[in-house]
Image: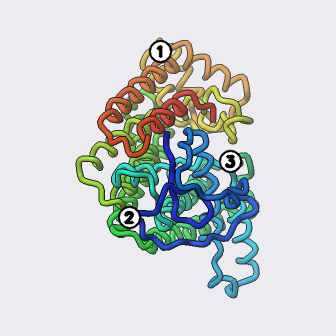
Amino acid sequence: MLTLVAAVQDTMPTRGTSGDTSPVMKERKSPQAGPPAAEQQQSASPSPVDFVSWAKTVQYQTQVVLHQILELEDERHLDPAWNKVLEQVRSYSLRPSKRIRPGLVLVGYALGRGDTRAPSGLWRFAAATELLHTFMLIHDDVADQADTRRGGAALHKMLGEGRLGENLAIVIGDHLYGRSLEVMLGCNLPDADVATRYFLKVCRYTAAGQYMDIRLPHQPLAELSIYNALRVAYLKTALYGFTAPLVCGAMLSGGDPELINKLERFGRYVGTAYQLRDDLLGLYGQSSVVGKPTDSDLAQGKRTFPLLAAYLRATPEARQELETLCIPGPKDETMLQRARELVEQHEGRAATERLIERSTNAASRILQSLPEAGGLKQMLRDLLQMLMIREA
């Protein structure tokens, strides 16, 4: 299994420092950052950790660095109200989450380097990808009129009623976007500018995916196909959520083009499987587990893969019913349940499960050709398994 080694002082176990000249970085510890891992003694030869332990370490250390990069001393004199809202933003940004993107940055770096040492600058770049993700979530929630995020109120709901809260949330998202790029470019790693430019290019594609996601509900199902849903999944989730962090990590390590090509393909398949699972959770998941309403996709009339796959197989009568049920707008529980039943009856759910399995198998085949790098293959296998069966 993977032992992840950090140059951050007293925050993670080490396996020696030869070849790693990154400066030690003292982080300000957040009261929300998690267990007191900083008090653990470093070991010259720690025991390898399993995926769950590794994931918890990544979550903890990301919290630590996020708290630090959100402490902006140069802004404290700007306005008292601004200081207050920044406290709300810190609280929002530090809500518990999977922190998949920072973890994948670390994985890409380790694969390119051939070992699992992680310099302090890498942690900053990795945390910045999570901050960029937070910016996108804020804007996404405004567009979707979402009320909750990660088990709490969406940021625009925290900041004010109606249009005021939405306007303020958009501004805060822009602020976090700027801060994330500032941290990425200032991480003091070779090729940070190359990796940042790559991430920004992917962000452009993500915007195109978001545009399609917002626009498609206003088109009849009869004019669409499953490829519309897959294109959105690729642009909005796979590229940005999985390919970009893996590739950027490899770029920061000086990884060769062949490795980067494999990681791009691996991220595409894993990200597609992830989004398809998300589509199923949006229909059949439990809100208390997912952390957000599971009726929002249907209420917004989103053209997800399960819905389009069911429409493709449905009878003319069922197609007409689906068209009516999937018009954007509020829906009562009877309408929601009927839509779920139709997707189930016409194999939309089964077709989605099959494609998740095929995408995961394709990712597994690429995984076989990746370097070992301290047990990373097994860690990535564990990640694939987790994504296959996740309920949130």
Q: Which mark is residue 106?
A: none
- Which of the image's four quarters has the C terminus? top right
Asked if one can make out residue 244 in the rendered structure from this viewpoint, the answer is: no
Asked if one can make out residue 43 in the rendered structure from this viewpoint, the answer is: yes
Density class for disc 2 (Cα within 10 Å; few <14, some 14-19, many ≥20) is: few
Q: Position of residue 259 (x, y in %)?
A: 28, 47
Asked which colour scheme the image uses, the reply is rainbow
- Looking at the image, the residue that sits furthest to the bottom is 77
- Considering the numbered disc 1 on the image, is that residue within a helix, a strand or a loop? loop
Q: Position of residue 60 (x, y in %)?
A: 64, 54
**Badge 1 or badge 2: first in the primary sequence:** 2
Q: Which mark is residue 150?
A: 3
Of tags 1 and 2, the one toward the viewer is 2
**Badge 3 or badge 2: first in the primary sequence:** 2
CA separation, marks 1 and 2?
A: 60 Å
CA separation, marks 3 and 2?
A: 39 Å
- Looking at the image, the residue that sits furthest to the front is 44
CA separation, marks 1 and 3?
A: 35 Å
Q: Position of residue 324 (x, y in %)?
A: 57, 26
Residue type marked 2 = Gly
Of tags 1 and 3, the one toward the viewer is 3
Residue type marked 3 = Arg
Q: Which mark is residue 19?
A: 2
Which residue is drawn at the image coordinates 69% and 66% (left, top)? Answer: 29
Q: Position of residue 371 (x, y in %)?
A: 33, 42
Residue type marked 1 = Ala
Which residue is drawn at the image coordinates 62% and 63% (left, top)? Answer: 10
